[in-house]
Image (cartoon, grey):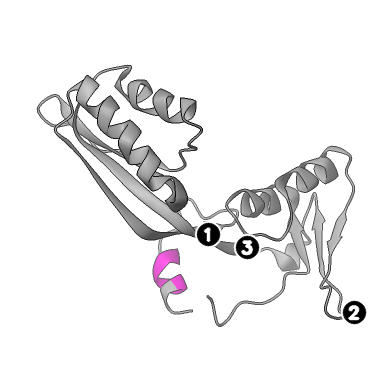
Amino acid sequence: MVKSARKLSHIQYDEMLELAAVGARILHPRAVEIGELYAVPIHVRSSFNNSVGTMIVAHVPMEDRQRVRGIAQETNVAKITVIGVRDRPGVAASIFEPLADGGISVDVIVQNIGRSGHTDLTFSVAESDLKAAEKIVKVAAKEVGATRVSSAGGIAKLSIVGTGMLGTPGLAPMLGRS
């Protein structure tokens, strides 16, 4: 994904935990949590060669600190938008509770700024859950008086992980040049 990517000599537990949680497929998030809990450094190595790997530790040496520490992508993603939802407390729960009851996990949730007492609510689900989620959401949307439901599959989610990224302008264009 990034031509200039390079192996890190060290990464902090919290950075690796975030990468694991967003689908980097390097380590299971629970393995990182246990390592951090007991302050056990984790040495991640390749199974294809004997090269030195990356150490997951509590504190990264100063020379290894960079704003962007890793990028993870997830491709099995779909989005659903409930359009024209009444902007009042409890409406989101009326949509998300039936999904939870149906065993469908919701990921990223974005609620637009309301206009004329209504708002749009967009969230992502696994693409494999899209058809079941659409059925559930259409029923819930009707019950809360939403205007309509829109959905799309074939979406990818890109997560950029690093410390000090928030409030640092210019990172997105830099990543686009990689």
Above or below: residue 139 compared with residue 74 = above
x then y, percent, for residue 17: 68, 48
Amino acid identity at mark 2: Asn
Callout 3 secondary element: loop
Q: Are marks 3 and 2 in contact (CB under 8 Å)?
A: no
Q: Nearer the viewer, residue 67 or 51?
A: 51
Callout 1 secondary element: strand
Q: Is residue 3 magenta?
A: no
Above or below: residue 101 compared with residue 44 = above
Residue position marked by numbered label 1 in the rendering: 160
Q: Residues within 10 Å of mark 1 (few under 14, many from 20)?
A: some
Residue position marked by numbered label 3 in the rendering: 69
Residue position marked by numbered label 2 in the rendering: 50
Q: Nearer the viewer, residue 30 or 9?
A: 30
Q: Write the start and end of the magenta stretch as one range.
A: 171-175
Q: Nearer the viewer, mark 3 or mark 2?
A: 2
Callout 2 secondary element: loop
Drawn side of residue 112 relative to residue 56, left or right = left
Q: In which quadrant of the rendered view does residue 139 lie?
A: top left
- Main SS, magenta region, reads helix
Q: Are marks 1 and 2 in contact (CB under 8 Å)?
A: no
